[in-house]
Amino acid sequence: MIEVKELSKHYPDKVALDKISLAFPAEKTTAIVGPSGSGKSTLLQALNLLERPDQGLLSIDDLTLDLAKPLTNNQILKVRQKTAMVFQEKALFTHLTVLKNLTEGPIKVQKKSKEEAEKKAFELLEQFDMSALSNRYPYQLSGGQQQRVAILRALAMQPKYLLLDEPTSALDPELEAQVLRVLKDLAAKDVSMIIVTHNMAFAEQVADQIVFIDNGQVGYAGPSTAFFHSENARIKQFLGAMSF
Ligand SMILES: Nc1ncnc2c1ncn2[C@@H]1O[C@H](COP(=O)(O)OP(=O)(O)O)[C@@H](O)[C@H]1O
Ligand SMILES: [Mg+2]
């Protein structure tokens, strides 16, 4: 489980996160939803310390960090070993083939052998029906294929928690559907996922838990069904504006 307690992040002219306390259970899918600028990306990036909160506690499984204190490189490494981030814009290495994109991290960062890294990469490509693409370069792939490779690249690091920040919002609807299918498969396999999304239909279908971030605070955290049938005026207003 990933847990944050009283997590705050202040920018000079903005409180991005205001004493947020939340739990993200292992082997479950949590969808983080909320208006633009509400603090969703800041929260997600805080979970693997890409963004450093000013204060609060961050726990990942048996490791607990007090974010008000300086962190050691070893502590940061431990957090990064358990988490992997997929961004909105596909960020593949353009000069490397699909296969090399999937093996680069495991070989360079995790010091795996080439054989072991390639075995895992081929397994993932096979599992997601993308083996035929292994020797292509990113420019030879569609946007949806590129984003699927970006997800597999994160999975190649075998993180316990997969963090995704609006992984489909740069894609047109057809390509979005391809990527969402991959994420649905992962959710069904009990991968631990935390996904920021504007796609309410997807969130409703796939997420075990919904976290609604509203102006830097937690507007709701709990089961998906209760969120989508909530009588709370603010939640109804938000869902109404998302018109799905
Ligand atoms: N580096 C930054 N410097 C100043 N303000 C920032 C920075 N990053 C984000 N913010 C502000 O913090 C708030 C939350 O941003 P963000 O987490 O990106 O929201 P979301 O992902 O929900 O759209 C916004 O008001 C945004 O303008
Ligand atoms: Mg964002």
Image (spheres, rainbow, N blue to C red):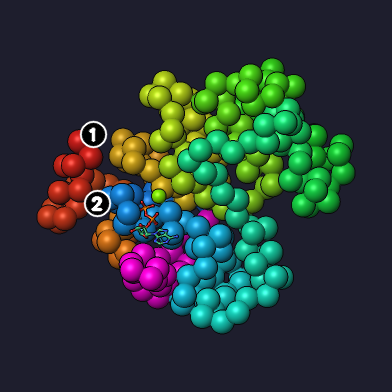
Residue 147 against residue 45 in the figure, above or below: above
Q: Is residue 31 magenta?
A: no
Q: To which residue does mark 2 refer?
A: 226
Q: Amino acid at mark 2?
A: Ala
Name the residue rendered at 31%, 35% in the picture: 201
Secondary element type, mark 2: helix
The label on residue 214 is none
Q: Amino acid at mark 1?
A: Phe
Chain part drawn in magenta: 2-26
Please state the horizontal and vertical placement of residue 21, each as a whole percent of the image: 38, 70
Please state the horizontal and vertical placement of residue 220, each as a whole percent of the image: 28, 59
Residue 11 visible (yes or no): yes
Q: Would you say the magenta stretch is mainly helix, strand or loop?
A: strand
Secondary element type, mark 1: loop
> Label 2 near label 1: C-beta < 8 Å?
no
Q: Tell me the quarter of the picture where residue 48 sits.
A: bottom right
Q: Quadrant of ligand 1?
A: bottom left
Earlier in the chain: of badge 1 and badge 2, it is 2
Q: To which residue does mark 1 refer?
A: 244
Residue 92 against residue 75 in the figure, above or below: above
